[in-house]
Amino acid sequence: MSQNGDRSLAEKLDAAIENLSTWYRVTLIMVIIGLLSLSVVISLSQYHFQEEINKHGEIKEIKDEKTGQIGLAFVPDTDEIFSTDSVLKLYTTQVWLMASNGVVIGLLSFLFLWITSRGQSYKKELKSIEGQLIRQSYLVNFETSLPEGETRTDKILNHSSLVFPELQAILRKVKPEGKKLPYKQNQSIGSETMDVVVSTKKGYFTVKFFDNVNAQTLEQFANNLSKSGKPLFRVLCLSKNFDDELQSAKLATIMQNLNLDFDMDLIFEDDQGYSMLWIN
């Protein structure tokens, strides 16, 4: 089976989002190059036109004393080289050329804004679908499957690899004889020591094992990670016990008040497996 066929649906969706982002950036670059090229052409055209006019004379505004209207006239420096009407037509053509180029620039600018708006909209929609898919995968794998592995770390990483395409992508690159995620233990992130840290293309995937967790513990932990400035992709908080407040209807408010700039999940851990308390 091909490598593409080995990919999970979540990985394929993640790849689609990346491809959309790539083509979105390429299209924007092409529009920008078009705008710059058009600006250069206009500038050079105007420069050469003015240069040619200046060789033979100049165009001046002349006021008609009878009507009070102001018109244009070409005033040659020497004897007439070409007719005044020809020069005026050339000048008028140049004005229309500038106006037409302005319209083109306007259309390209509209295209730029449209691509930006639609590209961000489609990307947001795909990210929403990916989030729903990961949430469903999270629930199915963590609620219904028994963890595999000899240690707590092996068990949570094996389970997490079934959910997150970022971890699945790393696993595919690991040599067949290994087939284990490369990770670091007891790594400091800010003032917190994380039990497991995996470096992914979207940031650090981290795991913290707790004995007991209450709202104050959770708030302090989240603040310490936020202050670290590290690129955190996902933070898993595992505990055998979460206090009653965190298991009540207040949990949603507590999590929202943390104002996290990364995803953090709360997971019950026992000898039989895992149970989700909160999926960010």
Image (cartoon, rainbow, N blue to C red):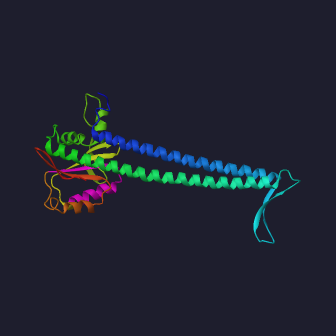
Indicate the position of residue 107 as horizontal and vertical percent values.
54, 53
Residue 230 is covered by the magenta coloring: yes
Give the quadrant of the N terminus: top left
Identify the residue at the far right of this view. 79
Q: Nearer the viewer, residue 224 or 191?
A: 224
Residue 182 at least partly seen:
no
31 lies above or below 248: above
Residue 140 at least partly seen:
yes
Indicate the position of residue 216 as horizontal and vertical percent values.
21, 62
Can you tell which quarter of the image residue 60 is in? bottom right
Q: Nearer the viewer, residue 185 or 93?
A: 93
Judged left or right of residue 92, residue 37 is left
Residue 57 is covered by the magenta coloring: no
Residue positioned 81% across, 55% down in the render: 84
State the extent of the magenta-drawn residues as a range: 217-239
Residue positioned 33% across, 54% down in the render: 228
Judged left or right of residue 1, residue 77 is right
Indicate the position of residue 35 as horizontal and vertical percent values.
57, 49
Residue positioned 50% across, 51% down in the render: 111
